[in-house]
Structures are given as structure tokens and as C-alpha cells.
Amino acid sequence: MSFSDIFDSYSWEETSRSIYAKSAADVEAALAKNTRTLEDFKALISPAAAPYLEQMAQLSRQLTLKRFGRVMQLYVPLYLSNECNNICTYCGFSFDNKVRRKTLSPMEIMQEVAVIKEMGYDHVLLVTGEANQTVHTDYFKKVLELIRPHFSHISMEVQPMDLQDYQELIPLGLNTVLVYQETYHREDYRKHHPKGKKSNFEYRLETPDRLGEAGIHKMGLGVLIGLEDWRTDSFFTALHLGYLEKKYWKSKYSLSFPRLRPFSGGLEPKVEMNDRELVQLICAYRLLNEEVELSISTRESTVFRDHIVKLGITAISAGSKTNPGGYAVEPESLEQFEISDERSPAAIAEMLREQGYEPVWKDWDSSLA
Amino acid sequence: MLTIADKVFGSRLLTGTGKFNSAVLMEEALLASGSELVTVALKRVDLKGQDDDILGHLKHSHISLLPNTSGVRNAKEAVFAAQLAREALETNWLKLEIHPDPKYLMPDPIETLKATEELAKLGFIILPYIHADPVLCKRLEDAGTAAVMPLGSAIGSNKGLKTIDFLEMIISQSNVPVIVDAGIGAPSDAAKAMEIGADAVLVNTAIAVSGDPVKMAEAFKIAVVAGRMAYEAKLGAISSLAAASSPLTSFLDEL
């Protein structure tokens, strides 16, 4: 059995209706509990919970402090390639977007690594588009061998792969894989991914199952907020997380909540999510799950990031470039999306310290696994 | 005095280095706690570099380091990590933590026993983090453990001594020091553990995450001392039977 079997037993419309039908009494009942169910989570992400935001935030902060302490993990993306055979209506690397394509060579990767190490990082997130002819498993194997001596923790956010690929990459030092479903709305998913391997909704949906089976150390889930109703999409993310935690109990989990950002020639969000709603969602995830890691990227604004630190987040990126070669090789090439918070890692570390948090650059050792 | 292996400690409060908002505050709190054995996660420290922030703040003559293997998932990884720790930190003391379950961080009894057997042969002084399982404690003794570290409740939960009945069994049977390791949320929990005869307690979250870690560290220090004194002075028996002032059966003596 995989997640598809469970997913297929849910209807998007009915789920959506039941979220919007939640009342203040449901929210209060959810807040009063010590352990919360998916029904409670629905109440907490519903419009009915809006007046309870402060209370949710207080609880979320308490729970996060208890589990994670006064520390914040720092990570940074390293874009290896913008080659992509997929058409995604919201992405700067989309196949039909006329940009110069580039995949970093080993020498260029090391130039980028040097800058990232200089910034203080020990955890790197490798990012690519999906170009299976050039950026394939063998390419990733070479990259892992190349950079493993320089990082204690390596994450990847690339195309979904087969079980066997993951089984080959994990022993080479792959610790974490992020694979966002983008949206759990099957029909809308098709509209946004008309061409390329990514158009296969089921293959993507079952990727976390393959990762779990391969014994990945940590996996990250999420949806791209703005494509569809975020409340319903977040419910399905939570459902997915709950299923995975039970089945692949040796893996760790993290969640992200990327909001659609502008890029040249890109799509306007169909559904806007305002800052209050993003805080509501982050707190709701924490109230549902005390152990899951919650991560925030430089997509969000400076002010928002400064304040969200205390509300449930456990990992934050800083100084990010979203173009291959962005740190050293070709700083001016086209970005996947515009980042919003452009402060340096040192400035973010300082902001964290001012708020009473210890920035953590290293929380794993490559010799451990 | 607490003796583990051949080493004598003046303090029965062990502490940890996680979750503090800065290494400076951590150092102040650990000094206030009086702790002489401080656990540090291998995954958090820079084993290659010379100037690790956490280690730099633990350089006090009365503090011994207790490296822990947090993050490993089986005996094989634990043995490897232990050897790495011994080399990098120059100590053969080890807090053995094997939790394959990253959600509740429950220790794996089977892998922990296996690793203890192997590490004891390699000359390590092992303090394993385990569930409050009396039989496992005896098996670990046979395997050559230096102490046992049963949990009071889940790590970081602050829920106190949920396992108290089993802790009492462990304490009554143990030939090695019993250190209650996880879940101690308040000084009163620590005092309680000491009152029932634990040899020591380990506290981290409750100190690091409190509003004033330095003050809280001192509170734990006092509580541990008080609890130990109460244990040594022998608490009065708790009785659920009332001692009636007008006995109901005294008439029998007169018959």
C-alpha cells in the first residue's frame, strides 16, 4: 500500500467543505487538547480560527521551544542547473521560458562551494530542474562525491527519482530529500504541469514512499501556496505527513510553505495567502505535530522572517541565490524566483542572536551515517 | 559522592548542552548547576576544527565531557561514532543513545544492548540511555555497562517521572549507578528521583528552555542535593492506613 490508496479515498471538494464548515467551538476544542487530530487541524486552519491567532502563536512557541530549544538551523540552496524539460506555469526554469540554460561543471561547483563555506555553512541544499539527459543519477553521484568532504549535511531538491536511484545516492552522503507535491488538487496539477515527466501526478505523490523505503534520513514535504486553496492543500500535506510518519518511522520530516513569488513572465497566484494566514498555518502545523521541522526560505520578507522566528520555525535559509552559478560563477544569470530577504547569513545570524536564538550551522556529522 | 566506573563526582546532577540560546549562557548555567559531567552531542560539535563554540565554553577543570551518540540509528553507527568521539575528544566515556525513531526519540533496547557489549570490549565507559526496563538494566550490567540511564518520560517532554514504578524496581536491583535521564521538567521531579534512590539525574531541556537558565540550573542543583539528603535520612513510610485514635478491635484484648 502507498499513499495513493489513502489519498484516493478523499475528495478534494468534501475536504474543502468540511474545513470551511469548522466553527469557533471546533477551534476552541482543538486548542484545549494536548494531542490533536486531523479534524482539529482542519479547525485550526479554517477561517474560524482567525480570531484565535494570538493564542495559537503562544502555544506554538511553547511547543517549539520545548522540543527544539532556543536554536535555529541554517541552510542555503546551491542551484546546480536550470535545465528543465518540464513546463510549470509558475517557474522561472520552465521549459518554455526562454532563458539561457546552464548546468554547473565540477570546477564551477567547487567555486560555488568555496563561497558557501566562506559564509559559514555546513548544510547545503542542492537544487536543479528536471533534465534527465544531463542532470541524472550519475551526475548527482559525482556531485555528492565532490562536495561530501565539505558539508556535514547534504539535502536535495531535484526531480523525483526511482527507488534504486535513492538507494544509490544515500550511501554517498545524501541525508535529506525535499519533494513538494505543488498541489494535491489532481486536475489543477495537470493544468500547471502540462508537459514533461512532472505531469505524472501519481509518480510525484508516491515519491515520499520511495524515499521512505530507501531509508532516507529526512524528507521534506509541502505545496506551492498560491496554486490552489491553501487550506485544503495543507490538509492533504498533513494527511501525507501522518501516513509517512507511521509507515517510515525511522525518517525525520520537515515542512515548508513556499508562497508563489514573481519571476519574469510568470503566473499570478490564483489564491493569495496573506501574512496572517501564513502564521496561522505555521502554528496549526506545530499544534498538530510537535516534532516536525518547519522551514522558512528567503522568499519571505525581512520583517516577516524576523517575527516568524519565534512562532514555530526551526530552520531558516539566508544569503540564498536561486540561479546556477549565483554565488560565484555567474551572479547575473536568471533566478528561479526573486528572493525577498537579501540579508547575508551573518546578518541573519545576528538577527537570531538578538532574538535569543543560537544559529546552528552544524547539526549532523557526515561520519555518523 | 557519586562514583561511576572509578571516577568520583561531587555533584549528582548531570547536564546537557542542547537548546541553549548561546554558548555563553550555556556555560553560565552549567557553572551554576555545579554539574561535573556534561553531555554533548557529537553531531553538534566540530570534531575536525580546533575552535568549536560549544567545546570552547566547557573548558573547566571540574567539568568532564560525556559525548553522546544522538542521531545514530543502530549499534554499528553507534560503535563508529564512539570511536570517533574517543579520538576527537580524548575520552572513553560515552553516553550511548540509539534512537531510530526521530519522532519520540525512544531508545532501541536491542541495538543498545548490542552496542554496549561491543563497546565494553573496546574499553569504553558506557552510560546507555534506555527505557525504564528493569530486565534490560540487568542485561546491560552483564554486558559491562558503567551505569544505566532510564527515562522518566520522553526526552524533552518535561512530564516528570511517568515511569516511577519501574524506576523503583531498577534502583532496588541495580549494581551500577542509576541515572534518571529524560523528562525531568522541574526541580521537584529531580528531587523526587533522588528521594526514591536514584544515584543521579540528567537535566537539559528544563534548564535550557526556562526563562532564566542560570537560576533554574541553581534550582536543580539545590533540588538534587535536597532529594539525596532526604533519601539518606530515610523518608517516613507513606501509609494509606489510618492510625485510628479509637481502635475498633481493642475490645478483643478485654475479652
Image (cartoon, coloured by chain):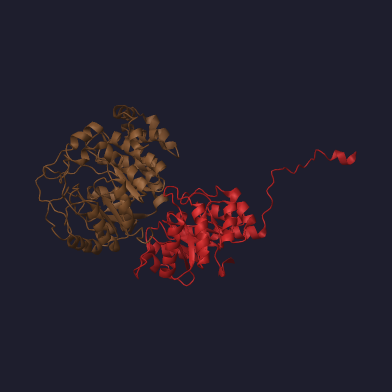
Chain colours: A brown, B red
Q: Quadrant of the N terminus of chain A?
A: top left
Residue sitting nearer the eye, A16 or B184: A16
Residue sitting nearer the eye, A181 or B240: A181
Query: Is residue A340 shown to the viewer in this render?
Result: yes
Residue sitting nearer the eye, A103 or A222: A103
Q: Please tell me in which quadrant of the rendered image residue A261 appears.
A: top left
Instruction: Give residue B220's position: percent from left, percent from top.
Output: 52, 58
Left or right? Give the position of A55 relative to A126.
Answer: right
- A180 versus B14 height, above or below: above
Instruction: Give residue B124's position: percent from left, percent from top.
Output: 50, 66
Left or right? Give the position of B94 relative to B4.
Answer: left
Q: Please tell me in which quadrant of the rendered image residue A324 appears.
A: bottom left
Instruction: Give residue B80's position: percent from left, percent from top.
Output: 42, 62
Query: Is residue B219 shown to the viewer in this render?
Result: no
Question: Image point 64% across, 58% down: which residue?
Answer: B231
Instruction: Give residue A80's position: percent from left, percent from top.
Output: 20, 54
Left or right? Give the position of A74 relative to A131.
Answer: right
Q: Quadrant of the C terminus of chain A?
A: bottom left
Q: Residue furthest bottom?
A: B61
Question: Image point 29% across, 42% down: which residue?
Answer: A222
Q: How many labels does the image show?
A: 0
Left or right? Give the position of A309 relative to A79.
Answer: right
Question: Image point 42% across, 65% down: which residue?
Answer: B27
- B55 versus A47 height, above or below: below
Q: Residue furthest right?
A: B255
- B74 versus B47 height, above or below: above
